[in-house]
Amino acid sequence: QTRREWRGARGAEHRARRARSAGTLPGMATAVAAMPKAPHLTSSVGLLAMLEEEEKEIKAHALRQLDRVVPDFWAEISESLPDIESLYEDDEFPQRQLAALVASKVYYYLGELGDALIFALGAEKLFHVDEGSEYVDTLIAKAIDEYCLLYQKRYEAAAAAEKEGGTSADLPIDKRLVDLVERMVESSLSKRAYQMVIGLALEARRQDLVERVILLCDSAPGEHEHDSSTGKMLDYCFSLFSSAVVPRSFRADLLGLLVRIYRSLDSPDHLGLCRCLAQLGDAPGVAAILSSLVESSDVEAVLMCYQVAFDLVDNCTQAFLGAVQERVQPKKEVPAEAAATLAAEPGEPSSKALSRLQLILSGEALIALNLDFLVRSNKTDNLILTQMKKSADQRNSLSHSAIVLAHSIMNAGTTADSFLRDNLEWLSRATNWAKFSATATLGVIHRGHIKQALSLLAPYLPQAGMSASPYSEGGALFALGIIHANHGLCIRSYLLDALRNAGTNEVVQHGCALGIGIAMMGSQDADLYEELKGVLFNDSAVAGEAAALAMGLVMLGSASPKAVEEMLGYAHDTAHEKIIRGLAVGIALCMYGREEEADSLVTSLLHEPDPILRYGAMYTIAFAYACTGSNSALRTCLHVAVSDVSDDVRRAAVIAIGFVLANAPAQCPRVVKLLAESYNPHVRYGSAFAVGISCAGSGSKEALDLLTPMLADPIDYVRQGALLASSMVLMQNSDHKPESRQSKHREDLKKVVGDKHEDTMTKFGAIVATGLLDAGGRNVTIALTSRTGNKIMPAIVGMGVFSHFWFWHPLCLFVSLAFTPTAAIGLNSDLRMPQWRFKSAAPPSAFAYPPPATNDKKEVASTVATASLSTTAKAAKIDKAKKAEAEAAEAAKAAQRVEEERVAKEKADREARDAMLSSLTELHKRGSVTGTLKAALAKEGAASVADDSMETDQPSKPELGELVANVKAAHFRGDMSTAAMATLLKHVSKAGEVEPDFEVLENPSRVLRTQERHCALLPLSRYEPIAKGRTSGVIMLKDMSPEAAEELLPLPAALAAAAEVVDEEEPAPPEPFTLPEE
């Protein structure tokens, strides 16, 4: 074929392509109109004719001119594309790159982005990546997509070859494409646009590029906070790598890269390093770091060791903590002769430090500290429970059970059960399964009370030779598991024996299985799994359901093929719906946190004919992708939510969206907005619950706006879900004004509970929602992610199982696993709480507790009309004389009253002063006021100077005004907390008082998540957190004045009992003596 024929064929092809492309780019006309015009040209025909000339300079000139007018005349130029392409293909043509650039632009306007990219690569450096035009931006995006796709294929091929034990040849990638993307990367790095480069590196699986960006942040910091230094970029990358942005298969490599960078830093970041190692499951690596820190003679190193250990307990499973604990063992006992030598050796670890580290890793220290905080700060308002008890229908057992459940939620972890003790007759109405739930609520109330758990529940637990109610026995075993939730190693043997001794009593088996599951979750204990499997295979509906759920809890996150296969096989064999449902949730629990690994199981479950197993598929997505924001998981849930024929499956699919988006609460209301308006009430219920789960404790306005219409839904269970979700969203909301959303919600709950015509299901939800609103003595919130961005496993599991109370009300108690205390607890190197205060830069009312409920009723004042009678002139004169006498008497009485008021005021001032001094003493005993400050305020030790005849041994007391002024001055200096000041000043009148614009908090203190950003150290504070910027949770404190004596708070009882072994010294041997002879 001749060259002319070839050009003719290419011209016809491009004319056809231009015809096809008409209308393919809807925004093209606007883009072309917006570009600058060349008024001196009305056509490009003349320039195109120059391409036919023989002189190369003329052709080059034509190309330069065409490059400028392509936006205007691309349609005409497309006719000559064969000529332009031939110039690019001519190796002897000096401006072949310019021809490629012109061809690329024409193809871009034709809508052929693939061809446009190919010629743009041929243009090499003439394609300016910094031009900023729509053409350049579009082709760069196309180039990046192609680049990332090719590098992903190369990475996957290498990973597959490495898994098989071989090597794979690198997938060929166009060098021009690599050069183009590299130029774009260099341009972004020069502008310090690190976030875009990190995104490209993750998409292309380029670890080397990630490492380069992280290390650049120190020498060339970016504009954003997270790229201002290498340390902050490492924190940002860890949170980024933990999300679904990065596939699980690539995540391990990235975390390994972070570990290498952390180890190479000049100043080590042990918190970040151990966080990465824990995510990788590297128990030996974590144990080695903890051992090196605890063996150091530096106090700061030991404090950092304890801080790392507390963070591990917050974020890791029992199995991982046990593996770390085995590798960090105290030194074995040594002979007395060698003790002095060993103690004198430098660098030898303190046995007490090692024992304290073991105490922390066991979880006992954190449990004891949280328990002490919840007991100390309990603000439960029992009047709310009393009002609900009076308002609810006394004959309705469901309302009775709901109030008992609400009481346990309101007092979760506080050990306060006075309401039950004061209403024993009312409580005794619970029978059968209501008695089971009522007994199990004791576990929620006393959660964490590990040392006294058996003695507390002794009256209800199974006793040898004695047969009590099986419902109270089963409930007590369930309660025992809740008390030891996620830390059940010490109670394992007791619960296992109880399960074996239960015989065929399915109620006791049910409670015992739930107790084992909740206490040993994530332990992957094979023996427990086999015992529970034996109970399951008995095919008892009640016991089998709990056993199946417990099997999933024990194997939590293991993705064990054996467990999944056995559970799925039995689900196909059994005919009991309760067992199948328990197995479906158990299978989902096994895939916790496995993300892409769960996809094949989800696909197989979605093709099951049994809707209960498809229901399990949705919870598999919920647990596998919880707090990841995975787009693939959301697509699957949304598809099932609108397509499945089963209402239960559709409801579960929408609830799963809440779990997936729990790390991005602002997105969930937008995603489920249309589902909340669905004609299907189950979908509406699911959307309400999804918003409640993802936005819990956030007070999100968008979430509340979405839930408000559902509070008036015609379907009772939709209203129930909306009430529960609203309470979860408003947990610890600090706006208590009468017109606030929280105040209105409380009024709605009160109205629903007291309405005799309200549906029972809605009333049940309102009562439980009231408990959630004031959960844990108003000191806890529902949080599925920690402050560092890690997933909280017990919270996710607890909320997942709680959502099944739809089928089984005792599962309501699992919600207590999701409760996270909002506390700041400062500890010194001896794990004691020093008297430490810090500042919140917000008024005390901004984050105050809700006001207490009242029984006051509004009274309408009645007025009595006064009759007016006429009098005679004589009577008026007599009255005038009497009035004069009365005025004289009144003047005398007024003078007397003034004196009496002066005396009364002095007496009241003395009483107020004495009351303040008494309260000051109580605060000192409680540890809220230091001894030095107490002595200064009370003027202790100062004797009054008086005459010789007067007694001189009475200490002087400050005047009330002086005492009040000194208290306020101490608060302003930060020597006294705002709560302590309020306790002292409550004895004096506060008329005209102006609320301070800051608050001084004392150790330990309630710190809401929204309050954390306002907290900071006081000037000249004696203690500083070893982890910079830490304002909540357990905070290890560095003493800046170690030579001064410390004033410590009383050691929590539970921690004191646990620490007895730590501080216990061997008793001295008795002195020699001689037995008397008979």
Image (cartoon, grey):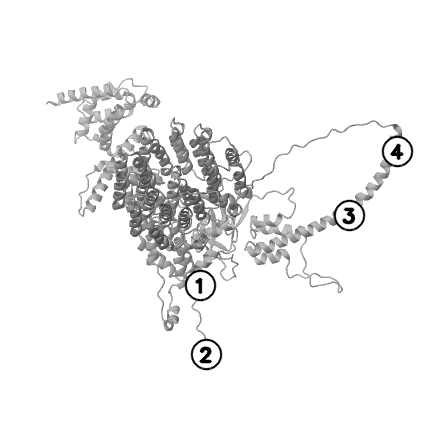
Q: Nearer the viewer, mark 3 or mark 2?
A: 2
Could you give the CA–CA distance between mark 3 and mark 4, rounded to whole angstroms?
32 Å
Is there a contact, CB below 8 Å, between mark 1 and mark 2? no
Q: Nearer the viewer, residue 650 or 578?
A: 578
| Residue shown at 18% from the left, 25% from the top | 55
> What SS does tag 4 mark?
helix
Q: Name the residue under label 3.
A: 899
Task: Check disc 1 and report the residue beneath it.
Answer: 1063
Cβ–Cβ under 8 Å for marks 2 and 4: no
Disc 2/disc 4 C-alpha distance (Å): 106 Å
Mark 4 sits on what residue? 878
> For the residues carrying marks 3 and 4, which lies nearer the camera in this image?
4
**Secondary structure category for the residue under label 1:** helix
Mark nearer the viewer, 2 or 4: 2
Residue at mark 1 to residue at mark 2: CA–CA distance: 29 Å
The first of marks 2 and 4 along the sequence is 4
Q: In which quarter of the image is the N terminus?
A: top left
Label 3, residues with CA under 10 Å away: few <14, some 14-19, many ≥20:
few
Residues marked 3 and 4 touching at CB (< 8 Å): no
Residue 700: percent from left, percent from top: 45, 35
- Where residue 934 sits, quadrant-wise, is bottom right
The residue sitting at 30% across, 49% down in the picture is: 529
Distance of mark 1 from mark 3, alpha carbons?
A: 63 Å
Mark 1 or 3, closer to the camera:
1
Residue type highlighted by circle 4: Ile
Give the answer, above or below, for where 701 lies relative to 836: above
Residue type at mark 2: give it.
Answer: Phe
Reading the image, the residue beneath label 2 is 1073
